[in-house]
Image (tube, rainbow, N blue to C red):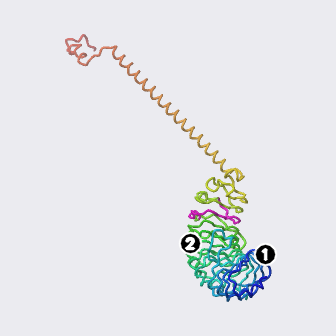
Amino acid sequence: MLASLGNLSSLVRLDLLEKTLEGSIPKDLGRIRSIKCLQLAFNKLAGIIPSSFYNNSALLDFKLLSNQLSGTIHPDIGLAFPHLNQTVPRDLGMLHNAQIIGMSHNQLDGNSTGGDGLSFIPSLVNYTQIKYLIFRDNLLRGSLPSTIDNLSTQALGINLGTNQIHGTVPSEIENLASLSIFDMSANRLVEVGNMINLIALYLPNNRLSGSLPNTLAKCVTLQDLRLDGNFFHGESFFHGEIPVALQILRSLEYLDLSCNNFSSHIPAYIGKLPFLAYLNLSFNELNGEVPKLGVFINATMVSVEGNYNLCGGIQQLNLSICPTSSIKKEKHLAIKIVVLVITTTFCLSLLALILIVRCWRRNSRKNVSSIQLYNNQFKRILDSDIHKAPRGFFESNIIGAGS
């Protein structure tokens, strides 16, 4: 059927979305110079994209995603379709009427020489209005070129997930100031560059190594972060503590760190992230007590399975009771008992001291009174009285004297 359509020289629009079409795309379709809209997505078309399409500069809307296409992407695709303005396919949700280049879910595998399959990216500099670049789920290989920052400054999203892209994300990507969605999931990346204004970052199932990238701390607007299933030196997983730098990402709503090798306790700050609605920490080597605040109080929105040394948390998580909690309770009880004993002893000692002092004072008063009573029973004789008694001790008054 498609072959016969090549004779419609005045054809402007052809919409064959989801028509279960099979076979290859006929070359004659690319020779229709009047056609502006060609939608062949969600079919079973196979083979290569005919070279006749690369010479058709009239195309504004060209959908080929979700087929079984193979072969290469023309390195000068940006020159071949200078006016391409493709609307967002239905599976991209709310991004209505966006300008996009999308050939996802095919088997495109790079250039004809078997080299770098991303060599077409520099030619996209001519797409001054492009906002979304989507080549997800193909066989593209190679590394992201540093010239990726030549994409339109209006570029909002790049999706190259599920390919065979390796190496690093070039630091030049931070020059795409409007970039908010970056999906490089299921590739072979080993390092991440600087990205500042991202809202969503998808890097699961790569070969990222070491600790979490420090550059994440700059993504203060980040809402969706997925880093599950990465590697350390090609064999191990992420290791060590969940970094404190993540607490800066106060806008996070979705965080997936599952299937790595984080081996510390769960930091309490995660439960304090104000907008975090989903958290996946499953299949790590985390240990210690699970917090009971924030996202952790909703068992349907948090996953910690596969961390066999975790304990505590809300009852719905079905974790064992933390032994440290029992010890802490016992310690607190022992401290309370010691404080009570010391306080009671002090109070009793103070009371005894008060009673002793009062008794001593009372006895002191009694002794003073007794002395005064004893003194009052006898007349007081002065020295002058003693002198006068013998009349001055004259010799005439002496009765006798000894020999």
Which one is nearer the viewer's eye here, 90 or 231?
90
Which one is nearer the viewer's eye here, 70 or 211?
70
Residue 84 percent across, percent down from the top left: 63, 82
Q: For the residues marked 1 and 2, what is the alpha-carbon distance in whole angstroms?
A: 42 Å
Instruction: Look at mark 2 in the image and give the residue it sits on.
Output: 196
Residue 97 percent across, percent down from the top left: 62, 73
Answer left or right for 358 relative to 23. left
- Identify the magenta region: 246-265
Name above or below for residue 268 compared with residue 85: above
Identify which amino acid the numbered label 2 is placed on: Ile
- Dot 2, how many residues are within 10 Å of its Cα: few (below 14), some (14-19), or many (20+)? many
Q: What residue appears at the point 66 percent right and 51 percent down from the top-left corner?
A: 324
Question: Does the magenta-highlighted stretch encompass residue 228?
Answer: no
Residue 375 percent across, percent down from the top left: 34, 17
Residue 50 percent across, percent down from the top left: 73, 87
Instruction: Look at mark 1 in the image and give the residue it sits on.
Output: 20
Of the 4 image quadrants, the one containing the C terminus is: top left
- Dot 1, how many residues are within 10 Å of its Cα: few (below 14), some (14-19), or many (20+)? few
Answer left or right for 343 relative to 41. left
Q: Given contact means CB atoms under 8 Å apart, are the residues at marks 1 and 2 in contact?
A: no
Which one is nearer the viewer's eye here, 178 or 340?
178
In the figure, residue 268 lies in which quadrant? bottom right
Q: Secondary structure at mark 1?
A: loop
Judged by depth in the image, the label closer to the viewer, 1 or 2, is 1
Q: Main secondary structure of the magenta part?
A: loop
Identify which amino acid the numbered label 1 is placed on: Thr
